[in-house]
Image (spheres, rainbow, N blue to C red):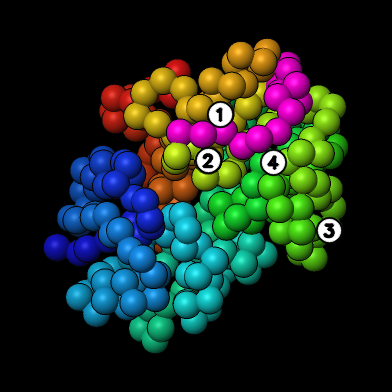
């Protein structure tokens, strides 16, 4: 049976094995999907593929390391300089980035959030954020700001994404229409430190998710008058469907998967 896995640290919380199990059952594909907790990406990935692994999803904190490890990348991964899907080929490995596609499908198609002509704030500047900035900027937003605790890291993104504003988290001011949390603070039960008045009347989206209820970020946004909130489970499902297609050549339906998981973002 073909083996697939998600690699990251931490990774115990991941529901990716359940998602891909649902996809496999629905499409009649025989496969096994695992979790790999690693301290370093390269040796763990090499060992997985030596043991006949057929594909990897990559999560925090390895997306940028995966970009350096693969032999070739698609346009989305090249733009983001981050990889979240690895596909073995006849010679070497190809790297892909499905994060932006997953986010936009969840926001626009599943949640009905309008991005065109909206002011959008993204918190964080890591590999997950790199994967969504290009698709967000091409969605017709009026303004796209990236805020990070270390402002220099946010500014470094302007070399690739020329139409973004780069600020420090402490410098966030004013109100936005859409606020997206791409930091890893939620994994520690925390929230990024920024002026919460920015979320008033905004739709707030956390790329992190929890098994039930609100993430810490979503709970904060509710308290400060957000128009709506959602965790990142829908994004995970949508990007997973694209990963499944890259590996198996079959694109599974995503409708109903969140309900089948029995989880709720609140």
* Residues at circles 1 and 2 in contact by the CB criterion of under 8 Å: yes
Check contact, mark 3 vs mark 4: CB within 8 A. no
- Answer with left or right where residue 252 lies relative to residue 179: left
Task: Name the residue tied to disc 4.
Answer: 122
Residue hosting label 2: 185
Instruction: Between residue 117 and residue 249, name the one nearer to us.
Output: 117
Between 178 and 55, the residue placed more toward the observer is: 178
Answer with left or right where residue 172 lies relative to residue 91.
right
Of the image marks 3 and 1, the number of the one nearer the N terminus: 3
> Which residue position holds label 3?
162
Gap between marks 1 and 2, in whole Å? Answer: 9 Å
Q: Which mark is residue 217?
A: 1
Question: What residue range appears in magenta?
Answer: 189-202
Residue 22 in view in this figure: yes
Q: Which numbered disc, 3 or 4, marks the residue closer to the eye? A: 4
Work out whether mark 1 precedes mark 2 in sequence or the reverse, and give the earlier one. 2
Residue at (47, 48) in percent of width and height: 239
**From the viewer's perspective, is the residue at label 3 or at label 2 nearer?**
2
| Mark earlier in primary sequence (3, 2) | 3
How far apart are the alpha carbons under marks 3 and 2?
26 Å
Which circle's residue, 4 or 1, is located before the other in the chain?
A: 4
Q: Secondary structure at mark 2?
A: helix
Q: Is residue 84 left or right of residue 177?
A: left
Q: Residue 168: horizontal and vertical position, in percent? A: 77, 45
For the stretch drawn in magenta, the main secondary structure is: loop
For image coordinates 44% across by 55% down, the residue present is 59
Q: Nearer the viewer, mark 4 or mark 1?
A: 1
Q: Is residue 253 above or below residue 45?
A: above
Per the model, the C-alpha gap separating discs 3 and 1 is 28 Å
Q: Residue at x 62, y 50 (%)?
A: 129
């Amino acid at each position: 049976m073909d083996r697939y896995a998600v690699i990251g640290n931490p990774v115990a919380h991941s529901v990716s094995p359940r998602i891909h199990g649902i996809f496999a059952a629905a499409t009649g594909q025989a496969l096994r999907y695992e979790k790999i907790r690693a301290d370093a990406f390269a040796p763990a990935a090499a060992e997985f593929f030596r043991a006949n692994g057929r594909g990897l999803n990559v999560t925090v904190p390895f997306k940028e390391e995966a970009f350096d490890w693969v032999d070739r990348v698609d346009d989305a991964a090249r733009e983001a300089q981050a990889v979240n899907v690895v596909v073995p080929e006849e010679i070497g490995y190809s790297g892909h980035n499905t994060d932006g596609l997953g986010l936009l499908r969840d926001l626009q198609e599943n949640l009905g959030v309008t991005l065109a002509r909206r002011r959008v704030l993204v918190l964080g500047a890591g590999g997950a954020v790199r994967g969504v900035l290009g698709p967000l900027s091409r969605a017709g937003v009026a303004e796209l700001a990236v805020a990070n605790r270390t402002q220099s890291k946010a500014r470094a993104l302007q070399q690739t994404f020329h139409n973004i504003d780069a600020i420090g988290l402490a410098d966030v001011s004013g109100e936005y229409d859409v606020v997206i949390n791409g930091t890893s603070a939620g994994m520690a039960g925390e929230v990024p430190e920024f002026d919460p008045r920015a979320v008033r009347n905004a739709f707030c989206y956390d790329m992190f998710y929890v098994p039930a209820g609100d993430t810490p970020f979503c709970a904060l946004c509710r308290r400060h008058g957000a128009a709506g909130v959602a965790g990142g489970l829908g994004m995970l499902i949508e990007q997973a469907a694209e990963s499944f297609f890259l590996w198996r050549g079959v694109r599974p339906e995503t409708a109903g998967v969140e309900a089948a998981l029995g989880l709720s973002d609140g």
